[in-house]
Amino acid sequence: DAGVIQSPRHEVTEMGQEVTLRCKPISGHNSLFWYRQTMMRGLELLIYFNNNVPIDDSGMPEDRFSAKMPNASFSTLKIQPSEPRDSAVYFCASRLGRSRAGYTFGSGTRLTVV
Amino acid sequence: AQTVTQSQPEMSVQEAETVTLSCTYDTSESDYYLFWYKQPPSRQMILVIRQEAYKQQNATENRFSVNFQKAAKSFSLKISDSQLGDAAMYFCAYRSVGANSKLTFGKGITLSVRP
């Protein structure tokens, strides 16, 4: 398996622009998680899905952030409009249901908003 | 809500020596999972070791082992025979056992290895 695939790896955008981050989980994994990593706040869970259904989005910072999972093999995290304080590394991770295993993380997307 | 605390922001170890990274957590649950993740400069999050709370035996993976003290809610990582490739940020994490559980991370600790 190719693991969790995220794109793009790097994204630089201007303030006010829409940004879409993409994630393909490991085939067969039915839980998907979006995390944000910053120096100040560490790793924060933004939202997670179970069987394509959002379970907890309490970590989504503002209405500017939205996430979708239209099918079991694809998820997006959208920021509209983007702001400089959104600059961070965004990770996607997946897990197999009740598995006692940890999560498998993607390589992350480094977002810079100028 | 569960919390994970890593109070040491940085540590340094001499190559071939042993180092212990500390982690404490707070929970009211009796069964759960604990993890250590490694994040090298490549930023990839790599699972190092896992411990199930119902198991009294400490987990071991090659040069990595944990000291799990359930009553004290402590979960430290010991790295033996440290190698230059061990230099990275290390995160302690907690997860409940439910199907809809989520992984909660500590702030992380930066480990440097001196040649």
Image (tube, rainbow, N blue to C red):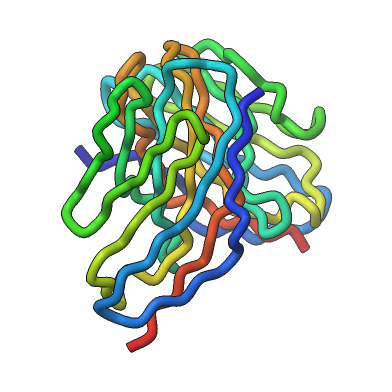
Residue A92 visible, this angle: yes
| B59 or A89, nearer to the observer | B59
Q: Position of residue B74 (x, y in %)?
A: 49, 40
Residue A69 visible, this angle: no
Residue A47 vs residue A27: left or right?
right
| B69 or A35, nearer to the observer | B69
Residue in view at x 30 percent, y 29 percent: A101
Please determine whether, in this image, residue B75 is positioned above or below residue A85: above
Residue in view at x 55 percent, y 55 percent: B108
| B51 or A44, nearer to the observer | B51
Residue A100 vs residue A36: left or right?
left
Residue A64 vs residue A50: left or right?
right
Residue in view at x 21 percent, y 59 percent: B63
Q: Position of residue B3 (x, y in %)?
A: 63, 34
> In the rendered picture of this protein, how many numbered marks are placed on residues?
0
Q: Quadrant of residue B81?
A: bottom left
Q: Position of residue B35 (x, y in %)?
A: 40, 39
Considering every residue shown, the one lying at the far bottom of the view is: B115
Considering every residue shown, the one lying at the far front of the view is: B71
Please determine whether, in this image, residue B51 is positioned above or below residue B55: below
Q: Quadrant of the C terminus of chain A?
A: bottom right
Q: Quadrant of the N terminus of chain A?
A: top left
Residue in view at x 51 percent, y 35 percent: B72
